[in-house]
């Protein structure tokens, strides 16, 4: 699919006020497929699929390069048609986007759909749209950030929907004096966007890294780089993701005997290990994980940098190993790693929810439907807003619904996750 056709699809989607996942649900495909279509990375040659795409987006098939008789328009005519339609859609999207976002946030509400409400509030704050937020005075910004981190650790999305927009707008208003707080705020936003599978994570990560460099604080810079590496990995840029993580771990600013610097290096090595798992390099994943485990053992059993996504410790490395083994394609090894942990040993509610979700994903890959469902229900009991909001959970629940016999427990979970 050409970049111009991809832009056409994206513009039509935005004009409807849909996310990539909204369009994917209507086409019964994955969000990543829509992303590849919009960037031109995936060709679209099937006529039936093109017609279905045109139908859902409410545009003519000719705009996507086919006619009623399935003949291709001359290139020049196609280009003219696309340019005209793109212009119209761009105008429509620009005119409709602000009220559409407000409508989504208002319709969703913090309790009925915390994910959409949180995303809508953060988008407005980052884009400078929506209603002004109540300002936070500069001296109170650090304590407000700490409170937001606690809300993240406790999976309180509805509270974050109020706290993060205020931190963003107030941090920018405070200027250079708040660069480190604002960098950490954007790092937290990036972490949330990664979890919720929203593309605005790239913008937040770029802002976090720029502000972190300006602050000159090693731990802030390390976390900004780690989140950027996660985004690169999720985009399939495995080599670049490993370079970002390991390059930062070796950076001069993170060297020294300070335990927190050592812990940050350990977190970056764990990120590189997870990237190796996604790249299919199981040996590399295990070698890097062993390196992180040795570092954690040297530091002792306590948790360091708890505010950095749950922190670094031997327990954190073991939790990482569950998802790494799953990503490397070995669900039995993932379950074996999980059995070496107990949920109460994990430092935050968010980490406990991740533990159960990772177990569910491993059981799902293994084809053990009942164990997968039970793990998801444990995750829901631990952190309902987190579980109902995560696309990874929704994908698992959808897979269970279509792959075999359903149960009242499964249908109830699907309903609570907003899956029809």
Image: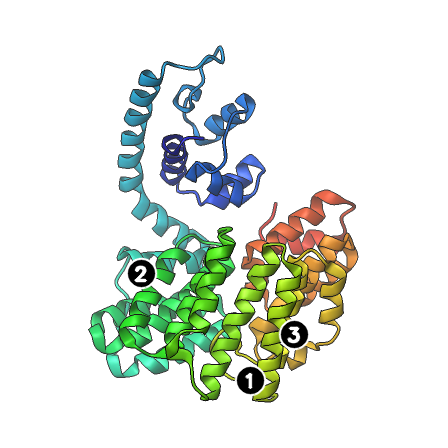
Question: Badge 3 local density, few (<14 within 10 Å), some, or many (20+)?
Answer: some
Is residue 410 positioned above or below 382 on the image?
above
Q: Nearer the viewer, residue 55 or 313?
A: 313
Image quarter for residue 204?
A: bottom left
Is residue 324 positioned above or below 259 on the image?
above
At mark 1, the secondary structure is loop
Number of the label disc, if any, that sits on residue 243: none
Tell me where residue 62 appears, x and y as whole percent: 41, 19
Residue at 46%, 12% (x, y): give it.
71
At mark 3, the secondary structure is helix
At mark 2, the secondary structure is helix
| Screen quadrant of the C terminus | top right
Tell me where residue 3 appears, x and y as whole percent: 38, 34
In the picture of the structure, the residue carrying the numbered disc 2 is 125
Tell me where residue 317 appears, x and y as whole percent: 61, 75
Residue at 50%, 62% (x, y): give it.
242
Residue 113 makes an appearance in the image: no
Residue at 34%, 66% (x, y): give it.
209
| Screen quadrant of the N terminus | top left
**Are the residues at dot 1 and dot 3 in contact (C-beta closer than 8 Å)?**
no
**Are the residues at dot 1 and dot 2 in contact (C-beta closer than 8 Å)?**
no
Question: Badge 2 local density, few (<14 within 10 Å), some, or many (20+)?
Answer: many
Which-is-in-front pick, marks 1 and 2?
A: 1
Q: Does residue 81 appear left or right of residue 151 in this picture?
A: left
Residue extending furthest top? 69
Mark-to-mark CA distance, 1 and 2: 32 Å
In the picture of the structure, the residue carrying the numbered disc 1 is 303
Q: Mark 1 or mark 3: which comes first in sequence? A: 1
Question: Badge 1 local density, few (<14 within 10 Å), some, or many (20+)?
Answer: some
Number of the label disc, if any, that sits on residue 318: 3
């Amino acid at each position: 699919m050409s970049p111009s056709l991809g832009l056409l699809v994206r513009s039509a989607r935005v004009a409807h006020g849909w996310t990539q996942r909204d369009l994917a649900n209507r086409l019964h495909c994955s969000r990543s497929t829509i992303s590849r279509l919009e960037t031109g990375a995936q060709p679209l040659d099937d006529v039936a699929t093109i017609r279905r795409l045109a139908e859902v987006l409410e545009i003519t098939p000719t705009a996507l390069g086919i006619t009623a008789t399935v003949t291709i328009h001359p290139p020049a005519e196609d280009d003219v048609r696309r340019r005209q339609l793109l212009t119209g859609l761009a105008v429509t999207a620009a005119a409709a986007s602000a009220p559409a976002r407000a409508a989504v946030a208002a319709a969703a509400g913090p309790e009925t759909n915390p994910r959409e409400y949180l995303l809508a509030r953060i988008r407005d704050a980052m884009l400078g749209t929506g209603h002004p937020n109540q300002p936070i005075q500069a001296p109170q910004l650090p304590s407000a950030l700490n409170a937001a981190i606690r809300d993240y650790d406790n999976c309180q999305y509805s509270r974050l929907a109020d706290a993060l927009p205020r931190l963003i707008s107030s941090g920018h208003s405070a200027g250079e004096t708040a660069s480190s707080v604002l960098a950490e705020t954007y790092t937290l936003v990036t972490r949330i966007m990664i979890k919720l599978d929203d593309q605005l994570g790239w913008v937040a990560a770029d802002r976090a890294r720029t502000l972190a460099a300006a602050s000159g604080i090693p731990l802030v810079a390390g976390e900004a780089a780690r989140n950027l590496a996660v985004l690169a990995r999720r985009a399939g840029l495995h080599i670049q993701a490993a370079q970002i993580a390991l390059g930062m771990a070796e950076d001069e600013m993170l060297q020294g005997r300070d335990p927190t610097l050592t812990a940050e290096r350990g977190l970056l090595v764990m990120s590189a290990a997870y990237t190796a798992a996604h790249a299919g390099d199981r040996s590399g994943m295990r070698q890097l994980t062993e390196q992180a485990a040795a570092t954690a053992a040297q530091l002792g059993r306590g948790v360091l940098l708890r505010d950095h996504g749950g922190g670094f410790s031997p327990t954190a490395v073991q939790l990482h190993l569950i998802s790494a083994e799953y990503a490397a394609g070995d669900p039995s090894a993932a379950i074996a790693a999980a059995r070496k942990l107990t949920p109460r040993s994990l430092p935050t509610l968010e980490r406990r929810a991740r533990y159960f979700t990772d177990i569910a994903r491993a059981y799902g890959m293994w084809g053990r439907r009942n164990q997968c469902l039970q793990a998801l229900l444990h995750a829901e009991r631990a952190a309902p807003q987190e579980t109902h909001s995560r696309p990874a959970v929704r994908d698992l629940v959808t897979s269970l619904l279509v792959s075999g016999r359903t149960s009242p427990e499964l249908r109830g979970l699907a309903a609570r996750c907003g899956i029809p």
